[in-house]
Amino acid sequence: MLGPVTLSLAAGECLCITGPSGSGKTLLLRALADLDPHDGEVLLQDMPARAIAPPQWRRQVGLLPPESSWWLRTARAHFHTVPPFTPALLGLEEDILDRPVNRLSSGERQRLALLRLLANRPHVLLLDEPTANLDADNTQRVEQLIADYRRQRHAAVIWVSHDPAQVKRVATRHARLIDGLLKEE
Amino acid sequence: MHMVVLSTTDLAIAATLVLLLALLSMYMRTGVSRQLLVAAVRTTLQLTLIGLVLKALFANAQPGWVALLSLSMLLIAGREVMARQERRFRGWWGYAIGTVSMFLSSFAVTIFALVVILNNVPWYSPQYAIPLLGMLLGNTMTGISIAMDRLNQAAWDQRSIIEARLMLGERWDVAVAEYRRKAIRSGMIPMINAMAAAGVVSLPGMMTGQILAGAAPVEAVKYQILIMFLITAGTGVGTLLAVSIGSRHLFDQRQRLCLDRLHAPDR
């Protein structure tokens, strides 16, 4: 269960959320993306979520889950618009978009899922352990890319992480979620 | 042409075949002999009962009685549709989706056939209405239960894909379109196969029955073709309806996938 959580985030901020497993981090992100029923109210630039059609809301408040899902043969088929960054910036080969998705490693799929999400140009990024499957080099590339996106588009980011060092590198604010309650540090 | 009237002894002889099969199954420890015997007893009792009901109904062809029997057939079929789905919707929805879809398809097609095609007086004459409705309900029931089982199972298994599509801003109907299409297909395939194989591989039961009862084969064939078309229309429309209502009910007002609306079996 997720307790009452009050939280406001300015454009361009990056809030890292840490906390033990089962404390409700994923639940909080899912509620913000309006994927689970909740009693709370979420506003984006003073507009309540319920005033915006769900597909539009989810394009503006983009959630990246820890495991990426693919349903078409190639990654490219999943993109409706051109992503704002090239795969090369994430250490991926240029032809990766046209290779069969099921042949790619989970780390490659996870980085492509980030590009796919950014292609929607969301105002808010909800990232659920976006570097969990990545080595140090690629973790650094992902962190850099998200920082660039945040700066260029004044996007707000909520980043769930297990790594204290990563929190130090990327966060402008840090909060801990314990038993469904959020405590900012 | 005349019809050979069957005596109780004739049926008893046929029953010994089932008994022998049950003994053989018991000997081979298949574990179905009990089920087999119960089903055989059920079929005897249920058919005898419906025979008596039809006899009474034919003697007293009031529209009210015809409607009452039709309604009870519908309600039992609705229960059967629900029971055949492993991941049915919880609560009344599980029952209502199948029953309402069957009502809208099977009843509409039966009444259409009775009024427009058969043109009998009175149109609700039970000799035509009840067998027609029975055949439509029986097949529509199978189509709907296969399709709904498929749809709900797919939603359960492919949850992460459906939700990933929602997260990227797809509408619920786009996110579930592929599973909806596959569910409708699987509901309609048995009927399409039956039409394709009819007369070449299998002689449909109704036509066989009419021929055994002494009808001219060409007349029996015409009836069979009519029935096949009606069943196809009824099954198709019923399946489309059930899958459309069902797939919408997998999502709430905010287009969230609501798998807690599905019944989860314990094992």
Image: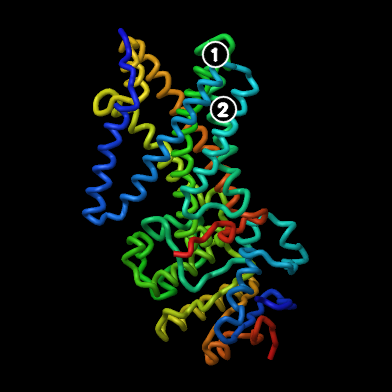
**Residue lying furthest right:** A46
Q: Chain of mark 1?
A: B
| The N terminus of chain B - image quarter | top left
| The C terminus of chain B - image quarter | bottom left
Q: Is residue A85 left or right of residue A57?
A: left
As drawn, B199 above or below B181: above
Q: Are marks 1 and 2 on the same chain?
A: yes
Residue B259: percent from left, percent from top = 56, 59
- Give the labeled residue for mark 2: B107
Q: Which mark is residue B116?
A: 1
Disc 1 residue type (three-letter): Val
Q: Is residue B42 left or right of residue B244?
A: left
Disc 2 residue type (three-letter): Phe
Say how many tags the image has. 2
- Disc with the residue nearer the chain's start (1 vs 2): 2
Give the distance between the C-alpha atoms of the residues marked 1 and 2, in whole angstroms: 14 Å
Between B209 and B198, the one nearer to me in the picture? B209
Disc 1 is placed on an element classified as: helix
Q: Is residue A43 left or right of residue B67?
A: right
Q: State the colouring used for the structure image.
A: rainbow
Q: Is residue B227 left or right of residue B162?
A: left
Residue A62: percent from left, percent from top = 59, 66
Q: Chain of mark 2?
A: B
* Quarter occupied by residue B11: top left
* Quarter occupied by residue B9: top left
- Asked if residue A174 shows in the view, the reply is no
* Quarter occupied by residue B3: top left
Between B46 and B70, the one nearer to me in the picture? B46
Disc 2 is placed on an element classified as: helix
Residue A139: percent from left, percent from top = 45, 82
Residue placed at 57% from the left, 25% from the top? B108
Between B197 and A158, the one nearer to me in the picture? B197
